[in-house]
Image: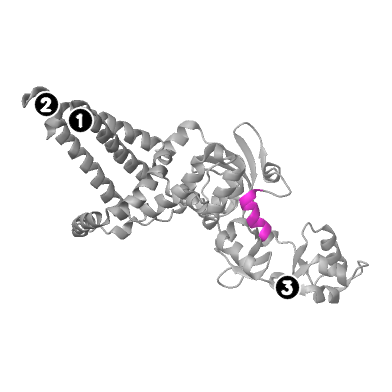
Amino acid sequence: MSDDVSLGALFGLLVVLLMLSAFFSGSETALMSLNRYRLRHRARSGHRGAQLAEQLLQRPDRLIGLILLGNNLVNFTAVALVTLIALKIGGEPAVALGTLILTVVVLIFSEAAPKTMAALRPERLAYPAAYVYYPLLFVTWPIVWLVNIASNSVLWLLGVRTSDAKMHSLTNEELRTIVFEAGSLISRKYRNMLINILDLEKVSVDDVMVPHNEIVGIDLDKDLSEIAEVIRNSEHTRLPIYRDNIDKVVGLLHLRHLAKLAPDSSFNKSDIEAAVVEPYFVPEGTPLSTQLVQFQRSKQRFALVVDEYGDIQGIVTLEDILEEIVGEFTTDPAASADEHIVRESATCYLVNGAANIRDMNRVMSWSLPTDGPKTLNGLIIEHLETIPASGTDLTIAGYPIEIVSSDENRVLSARVHEPRIENAVAENN
């Protein structure tokens, strides 16, 4: 029967089979190389090819079974066809040569080239291929089903389950990597904001709160003139109200409410007490991501941070959390750092002991440890396990530090030197 078929027709059929083999090989790589999150986005946007591809990839075992069925079918048919062509041209001795030539042609034109192109541009091939595979899967379903039963049984014995094919959620660090690799697709400003959002769970209210000793509030035990002075000089619209000390807090005063009760600015302590609202307390160590949600749920903007004994440790506001995401609202970070950091030379800075370590690291691009004390004073005392005298030298995380002044219970100021390159290398090693 093969004698009745012309050699040209056999070669033509062989080319078609090689093209089909290239299609199966390339489309398999393309479908498996698709970015699943981009695929989901395009499918939700109404792209029909993406929708079909997403449905096919929900059961990759079935898709791979279909592709391998088609690929092996055309490849084995091509081998048989080459055998016929070789017999027609040169007899049995030509069969071995024909098999060798077919192997090289399949390897280059039906495997390497289409798979490489598919890996580089998967969407260009995957979406059109989905239009072919989706109906073809229904036509060949009985055969594919039998193949899947056999292959999945082998996988089951090896401890692999087809349910593992579901899309896994990205971890926090994987999301960070995606944001960093977005490059020019996301501006630097917005990329930093996204990273800051992902880092919210790593930062607690302790890191951003106004500490206990810096809280500005109204002491009802003081004279009205002193209270009025505090209100006039306040840079905040909300002030805690307490008696004697901040641990005996009474409530929170919004200056706008006081203005309504005393529009002529002539108020007394009774007016203040009438305008006070219940204080809102949060435990220390609360992650900023959690506290942001709590602020939203409770419709609060101001909270007092307390420790396990109920003692007030500081104040955190909604603005403090938002500034962790978008940066300072009203002042430049570098300008605000000047209050605590003064440059003395190219590599030396005079730093106030109350300076926040995280702010110092962010503004100065330093890498002082932040997993312990929040201020430079606390970091130095923890490192030395004593309150140092003026002139004491120490090194923390490669940063040489000289104590400039201190009193009986804290470090007032210190001179921080940027680490030398050789020291930084030694620290890293």
Residue sitting at x 81%, y 65%: 255
First-in-chain label (2 vs 3): 2
Determine contact: label 1, label 2, CB under 8 Å: yes
Helix, strand or loop at disc 1? helix
Task: State the separation of the CA atoms marked 3 and 1.
Answer: 93 Å
Camera-side mark, 2 or 3: 2
Residue 251's label in the rendered image is 3
Frontmost residue, 171 versus 205: 171
Which amino acid, by three-letter code, is at mark 3? Gly
Q: Write down the residue under mark 2.
A: 88
Which amino acid, by three-letter code, is at mark 2? Lys
Task: State the separation of the CA atoms marked 2 and 3.
Answer: 100 Å
Residue 122's label in the rendered image is none
Which amino acid, by three-letter code, is at mark 1? Leu
Residue 10's label in the rendered image is 1
State which quarter of the image contains the C terminus: top left
Q: Position of residue 303 (x, y in %)?
A: 66, 66
